[in-house]
């Protein structure tokens, strides 16, 4: 069983967004999070009417991106940093959704640097139970209900569908040629599983393990933690990653070569998603699903 966003737990996003303090329907806001400066810089610079905020000394940048109210923030690397920034952003800005952008190491054999993964699920590969019989991947217990979530957290199907639609509109930057893949290189966008853990993976054996045991398509250090926070607080979340490397023995060298362009590819997809959200595509897709 896959865990979905709970309803009626703590302050759900639908409650937050229903009305403002004056009784007027609140304008939706999207939070965009990236771990590194390179992952958020392009989006931050695109913000119009920008306001800079400090929450507990940490910077958040609010403005309009493709016409939509957006808050951009840098998480810094790792699950604890990611969870902290996501929680502060949700508590302070009450977003309609949270988007995670940035780079990752590819695990799917058909991916190469520059290609992208839209998460349909996240899994924390280091949230496990070790025993003599092996490793059991586990989800976290909800701090209010005590219910244990699945190890795999589903992304909202409406956000996934918007991301897939947005990807078809974007001109991505090709990073590598035919020598890195079995077919002629076009930037490839797949929908799959993003694995998260507090480890930078540059190991062929670990890469193979994550692929074989979790069927993960890429590995990074923040997305699953943000997804857990959003699951707990009832806020829709979507993780977008562009491959900077293939999580193997050349991962660090590849990251140095490709990270900036990969981060820009991810940012371009996020921009296109926000553009569709501003055009009301989320409401349209939700209505279509209700009719089915």
Image (tube, grey):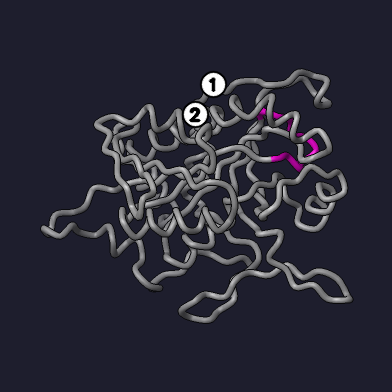
Exactly how many numbered labels are in the figure?
A: 2
Farthest residue to the bottom: give it: 146
Relative height, residue 269 to residue 134 (above, below):
above
Q: Using a 10 Å C-alpha cutoff, classify the residue at mark 2 as few (fewer than 14 neighbours), some (14 to 19) or many (20 or more).
A: many
Q: Is residue 148 left or right of residue 22?
A: right
Q: Is residue 177 left or right of residue 121?
A: right
User: What x and y, as percent, mark residue 190?
Assistant: 65, 38
Farthest residue to the front: give it: 57
Nearer the observer, 288 or 268: 268
Mark 1 falls on what kind of element?
Answer: loop
**Residue 54 visible in the shown view:** yes
Residue drawn 70% across the image and 29% down it: 113
In which quadrant of the rendered view does residue 45 lie? top left
Residue drawn 42% across the image and 65% down it: 233
Q: Are marks 2 and 1 in contact (CB under 8 Å)?
A: yes
Query: What is the magenta segment's predominant secondary structure?
Result: loop
In which quadrant of the rendered view does residue 2 lie? bottom right
User: What x and y, as percent, mark residue 158?
Assistant: 47, 49
Residue span colored magenta:
105-114
- Real-space Cα separation, disc 2 to disc 1, in angstroms: 8 Å
Mark 2 lies on residue: 268
Q: Is residue 107 magenta?
A: yes
Q: Which mark is residue 50?
A: none
Residue drawn 65% across the image and 49% down it: 194
Mark 1 lies on residue: 171
Residue drawn 80% across the image and 23% down it: 183
User: What x and y, as percent, mark residue 189?
Assistant: 63, 34
**Residue 284 visible in the shown view:** no
User: What x and y, as percent, mark residue 4?
Assistant: 53, 64
Nearer the observer, 54 or 178: 54
């Amino acid at each position: 069983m896959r865990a979905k966003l709970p309803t009626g737990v703590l302050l759900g996003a639908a409650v937050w967004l229903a009305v403002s303090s004056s009784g007027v329907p609140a304008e939706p806001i999207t939070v965009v999070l990236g771990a590194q400066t390179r992952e958020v810089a392009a989006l931050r610079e695109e913000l119009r009417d920008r306001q800079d905020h400090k929450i507990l000394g940490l910077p958040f940048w609010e403005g309009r991106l493709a016409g939509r109210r957006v808050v951009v923030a840098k998480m810094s690397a790792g699950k604890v940093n990611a969870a902290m920034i996501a929680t502060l952003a949700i508590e302070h800005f009450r977003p309609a959704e949270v988007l995670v952008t940035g780079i990752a190491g590819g695990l799917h054999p058909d991916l190469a640097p520059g290609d992208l993964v839209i998460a349909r699920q996240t899994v924390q590969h280091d949230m496990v139970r070790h025993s003599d019989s092996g490793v059991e991947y586990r989800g976290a217990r909800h701090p209010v209900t005590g219910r244990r979530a699945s190890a795999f957290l589903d992304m909202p199907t409406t956000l996934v569908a918007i991301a897939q639609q947005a990807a078809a509109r974007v001109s991505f930057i090709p990073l590598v040629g035919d020598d890195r893949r079995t077919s002629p290189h076009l930037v490839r966008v797949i929908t799959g599983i993003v694995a998260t853990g507090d480890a930078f993976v540059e190991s062929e054996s670990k890469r193979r393990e994550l692929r074989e045991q979790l069927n993960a398509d890429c590995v990074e250090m923040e997305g699953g933690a943000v997804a857990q926070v959003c699951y707990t607080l009832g806020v829709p979340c979507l993780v977008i990653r562009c491959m900077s490397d293939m999580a193997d023995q050349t991962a660090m060298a590849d990251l140095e070569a490709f990270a900036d362009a990969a981060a820009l590819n991810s940012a371009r997809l996020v921009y296109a998603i926000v553009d569709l959200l501003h055009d009301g595509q989320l409401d349209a897709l939700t209505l279509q699903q209700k009719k089915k």
